[in-house]
Image (spheres, rainbow, N blue to C red):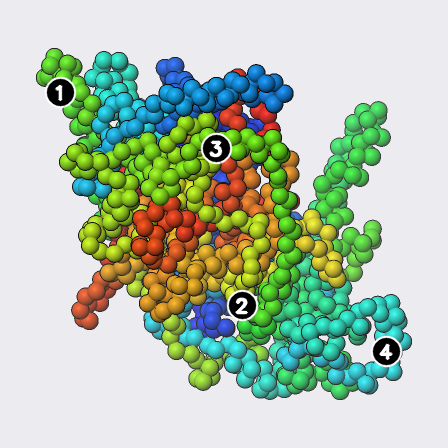
Amino acid sequence: MATDPALPIPISYISGSYYLFSIDAVTYLRREHHICGVLIGTLPQIPQQNVFLAMPLQLMPEEARLLVDKGVACIVDEIKAHKDGMTSIMEEDRKRYLRDLEAEGLQAMRLQNRRKEQLREEALKNIDAKKAAKASKKAAQKQAVADNAAGDDPALELFAGGEQAQDAGPQRPTPSETAMAVTPATSYPPMPSRPASDQILPSPEVPSSYPLFAHLHSKGYFLSPGLRFGCQYLAYPGDPLRFHSHFLVVSAEWDEEINLMDIIAGGRLGTGVKKGFLVGGAEQTGPGAEDSVRTFSVEWAGM
Amino acid sequence: MADTDEAAAHLPASQDSAPQIETDLSDETQDFRFLNNLAFPSDSSQTSLPRRGEKDFEPNPTLYQADILDASRQAMHNALSHPRLHHPKHRVIAFYAPDGPAPPTNVTEEKDEKETTTNEDDEQNPKKATNADAGTGIGVPADSCVYVPNPKGQYFKSMGRADRWNRVWLLPEEALYLIERGSLDIRWPVSVTGPTAEEGEKDLGIPMSLQAAYACFTGRGGLSVERFSVYTGLRRLGYTVIRAPGWDDESDEVQDEESAPQQGLGIFGRFLHWLHSWNSSTGVTTTGPVVGLGIHRSYNDIYRKLAVIPYHDPVTPQFPRRKTTAPFRVVFHVYKPSTAFRKSAPPTPDFRIAVVNSRTQTTMPTLSQLGTLLESTPLDPPRGEKMDRMLYMRLRHGYRNVILAVVDQGVVSFLRVGDAAFGKEKIYAEKPPGPKKGGNRPRPKK
Amino acid sequence: MTSQPPSTPNPAPEVAEAASSKIEPTQENVRPAPARRPRPQRPNYRHIHRFPLPLTVHPLPPLFPHNPLSVISVVLSYLTYLISPPHQELYSAYFDSNTSSVHITDEKTIRALWEMGFFGKGSLSRSEPSWLEREKKRRGQFGGKTSEDVTRERRTERRELKLERARMEKLAIEQRLQAEAAAKENGTASPDVDADSTSNGTASTTEKFSLRKAREAKMLESQQSGEQTQMADSGNASPGRKTVRFSPVVQEKQFISDSTVLQLPESLIDGHKADEESLLKNEEHLQLSNEEALFLAYGLGALQVYDSDQKNTIPTSSLLTLFRQHSYFPPRSPAANLDPDDPFLVSYVVYHHYRSLGWIVRSGVKFGVDYILYNRGPVFSHAEFALVVIPSYDLPYWSETEERRAHAEEKQARSWWWLHCVNRVQAQVRKSLVICYVEVPPPDDAQALGNDIGALLGRYKVRDVTIKRWVPNRSRD
C-alpha cells in the first residue's frame, strides 16, 4: 500500500521541466490534490507499447505552481542537487546503500524464481492433463495428435518461450542465489532525503492561462494537457482513470478578440465528441477581487 | 438538395460510440486495472494489450464507484512501483562519463593484459579505428556520455558507436531510453562518488537512479525532454530513430534536387494551341473578364485562361537555399520496424521528424518556416500505380513531406505535412465518371 | 437531409475508387447504405449540372489533319461565329451593403448560377435555394416531409431520449445508494470490488444506458401511470453537481420552442389555407459571397452587379474596391487606404485559384474553415478538402521595420491548439485539412498598377500544404 510522503514534496526541476520520481508522491498528489501530470517513462514490465506508461511523471508548470502555492511541494534544482549530492556521500552511507540494494535484488530474485516455479508446474500439469485426454482418444488419431502437441499447444509454447527454458532442462532447477541488480527510481537515498536550501528554486513561471487552470482545479476538475485534442486543457469531472473528460478548455485574455471561426471549430469539435467547449479567462477587475475567472461553455446547437 | 457535407457528420461511423478513425488507445488515460490482467513481473512473452475500458460519465456518491476508483488507483500504484531489475545473466552494465568520450583511464596499465584482444579487434575492424568522428579522438560522437564495456543484446544493433577499445558509447537519449526500460544498469563513475569496493575488487560504483539519469541526460547535447519524448515513444513502438544532421543548430540537411522531366507538346498540339489562342480573344485581366469576351471553344480553355494566380511549385528548386531554424528543422530520421537498418550505413529514412515544444513555440509555423523545413527534405513526388489512379491520394501525399511532433508537456502529437501543390492538378481535365454505373473509368494519364 | 447514400447510381469518382481498391476505406465515405425510407426518384444531377460554369462553349468540329474536309468545316464554323456571334448570357445581381453581400432575386438567374457551378446559397436554405419547394411540401401540396422536418423530428426525439437516459441513470444511482445504506445498517460490508476484476467494472450504476434502451423504457412508461414523470422532475434538481448536460432550463426551452415550431403550421393552415395557396410566392433570394460575385463578374464576365439602388451597375474595378472596404468591420470609408492583406483580397486570391483549377469552392464555415472544395459539386460527392487561409509575410518588405514585423507576426500567428482543433473537426467529418498560405506583396502603388486587377492578383502567390494526424502505431508496417 502507498505510504504518504513527507511534505513538502520535492518536485524535480530539470532543464525547464518539472518531474516526480517517487511513486508515493504521485499516488498521494493524485488522490489528495487531483494532480495527475503525465507519465512519460517506459513501463519496464511491458516496454514495447505506449498505452501504459510509467515513471517519471511530468508536471505542467501550472500543476507545479499550484502545489507550491498550496505549500504541498517545493521545486528542487535536480541537476545541482545531484552535482552536490553524489560527490559528498559518506563512505558509510554508500556501503549501506549498496547493501540495501543487494538485499532488494536478492528478494526480487527469490520472488521471480518462485513465480517461474509456479508457472512451470502449471504448464506441466496442463501438458499432463492434455496427454491424458489425448490418450483416451481413438488409436487412429493418436499419432497425429501427438505430433500436433509439440507444435500447437499454447502451454508448451509458453514454456519453451520463457527465459528459463534453455537452462531449466527436465530436472529440478536449483534457484540461483545471486541478486538481481536494481535501478532505483530515485536518488534519495543515497542522497539526503531533504534538499539543501540552496537547491530550492522559486515558484514556477506559468502561462497566461494559469488563472483559468487554477479556477477549474479549485472547482474539483482534474486537468491534463489538451493540445492533442485541440484545446489547452482537458477538464475531467473526476480522476481520468475512471472518467471521460467533460470539457475542452481554452483560455483567453479578457480583452482578447476571439475569432468567431475558432469558436465554431471548438464548439463543433466538442459537440462531436460529446464534450463542452469551454472558453474562459480572468476578468480584469480591481486588485481586491480574489477569483475573477469567468467561463463560457459553447455547444453546437445545429439548428 | 440539402448539403451532403452536413450529413457526413451524422453518418453512423462518425458517432463516437463507434470506433473512429482517430481513436488511439494511448490517447487517453487507461485504467491500470487492465494492466493487472497481464502476467508479470518480467514475463516478456506476454505483450498483448487489453481492450480499452469503460468509464463512468461523472462521479456519484455511491461507495461502489469509490471502490472501483480506489482499485484503479491501487493497480496504478502497484504497476508503477515495479522496480527495474537486471537478471545477472542478462545484465548489461554501463558507466556514466560526465565529461564525454575519453580513452579508458587505466588504458596504460591494462594495455599489456588486453593487448592481444585489442589488436585482434583492430585487425578485424580496421575501418572502425580509422573512423574520424566529431573530434573526440576515439571515433564516437562528442555528445556520447555513457559507455558499455561489454555490449551484448539486440539494442546495440541500432544504437551507440564502438570505440577502439570495443566499448560502445551511447548518446544521452539512447542511455536514458535503455535505463528507463530496465535494459541497462548504468553506474556512477567512481571518480564522482568515491570508491565503493574494497582494495583489489572490481569497483562497479553506485547504480544510477532513473532520477539521476534524467538529471544527467536531459538538457545534455541538445537533448530536450521533448525530443526525448518523441525518441522514446517511437522506439517503444519498434521504430529505429537516429539523430538527423539538423540536430545541432549549425549543420543543416542538404538535399540534392532531381529535376522534374518537362513534358513537351507535340507539333500538332502546338498548332491546336495556336489556333485556340488566335481565335479566342485574349483575356482582359485588367478589369475582366479574364476569360475574354469571345467565343469559348471548351471549358478547359476557360479554365486555362482563369489561371492568373501564381502558385508555388515544389518541384522547382528554390534558390537561394534557405537555412532551417529550430524548432522547425528535421532532428530525427525514423525507420519502420520492417526497414532493414545498419547503423554503420543508415538507409534513406522512412520519416523525417521535427520536434516542437508547444510551450516555447506557441504558434504554428509561418509559411517561411514551414517552406524552409519542407525544402530541406528530398523531393518525394506522388508516384506509383495507386497514386496515378487516385487524385485525392496524390494531393494528400504531396511532393515533399515532413512530420511535426508537437509536444505539450509530455503529450506528443504528430502531424504529417505534405507539400501539396493543388495547382499542379487540373481537376477540370479529369474525366468525369463514365455514363454507365459501375463502368470502368479510363485511367487518367499524367 | 437529403444526402446521397453511396448505393445510389453514379457514385462520385473517388468514392468508387476507394470502394474498389479498399485503400483507407474510412477516409472515403464508404460504408454500407443505411436502410432508409424510400425516397422519390433522384433528380438527374448529371444532366442538370452538365455545365461546370455559367458560360456557353461552342466546340469546334473535330479536326482530322489528314482530312481536308474537316479543316474546311473548322474554318466554316469560325466564319459562322464571326458573322453572327452567339449570345452570351449576362446575369444581374445587386450589392446589399447591410449584409455586405450580393443578392439575386430573379428566378432564372438563381437556377442558372446554382446549376452551372454551384454559386451562392439560398437565403432561407442551407445551401441550394429550396425554400419554395419545402414550403409547398410543408403546406401539403406535395405531401411528405421536407428534410428539415425530418431533421427536426429526429433531434426532438434524441433530446427526449437523452433526458430519459439521464433520468434512468439517476434512478439507478439512487437505488444503489439505498442498497448501500441498507447494507451498512445490516452491518454487512458494501459489495467488494476486486482490484483485479475489470469485467464487472461498469455494472449496475455504471451500466451504459443506450438510447435504444431509453427508447424501450419510454415505450413501457407510456403505458404506465404519470407517477414516474413526477419523479423525473424532482430528480432534475440536483444542486452542486457538475454536469456537462447543458442546463435543464436550456434543454427545456429548446424543447418547447421546437414543438411550437412543429405545431404552428397546422394552425396557420387551418386559418388561412384558402388564400395562402394562391399567394405563395418565393420569399427566398440567392446570396452570393463577395468572392463569388467578383469571380463571376471579373473572372467569367457572366455577372453585372448593380448598386444598392439597383440603378447603376458597378464597374469591376470599383466592385473590387467595394468588397475590399467591406471586408473590414465596420467597412472602411472610401477615403481610407486599402491594405494588401485586407481579408477580401487574400480570400479572393484563394477562391480564384481553386476555381481556376476546376474545384467547386464553397464556404467552410460549418467546419470552422474558410473553404471546402468539391470535385464537380455538392450533389455528386462530399467535399474532400477543407481549406484554411493564412496570410504569409515572407517578402523582405515585411521585416524592414519593427512595426511591419509586429503586424506580420500578429496576422500570421495561429496557435497550436487551434490547428489541432480544426484538424480534429475535419477528421470527424472525414475531410483532409489543407492550409493555404497566401504570400502578401508589399502595398501596391496604385498609380503604377493603374487599377489593373490582373496585375494586382498576379502579385500574390499561394502555397498549399496538407495536414494530417500521423499515428505512429498505424504507420509501422
Tag on residue B278? 3
Q: Are marks 2 and 3 on the same chain?
A: yes
Label 4: which secondary element? helix
Pointer 4: what residue?
A: B114
- How far from the left and from the top, in percent, is residue C117? 38, 29
Q: Nearer the viewer, mark 1 or mark 3?
A: 3
Asked whether, in this view, residue C220 is left or right of residue B282, the answer is left
* Mark nearer the N terminus (4 vs 3): 4
In the rendering, at what x and y percent does residue A154 appear?
71, 41
Is residue C373 in view from this perspective?
no
Return the disc, 2 or 3, that comes first in the chain's sequence. 2
Residue that badge 1 annotates: C268
Same chain for marks 1 and 3?
Answer: no
Q: Position of residue C453 (x, y in %)?
A: 35, 46
Label 3 crowd bin: few (<14), some (14–19), many (20+), radius 10 Å: few
The span from disc 1 to disc 3 (Cα, nearest Å) is 63 Å
Q: Hey, what amino acid is under mark 2?
A: Ser
The answer for how far apart the CA atoms under marks 2 and 3 are is 63 Å
Q: Residue B83 is drawn in which quadrant?
A: bottom right
Amino acid type at image mark 4: Lys
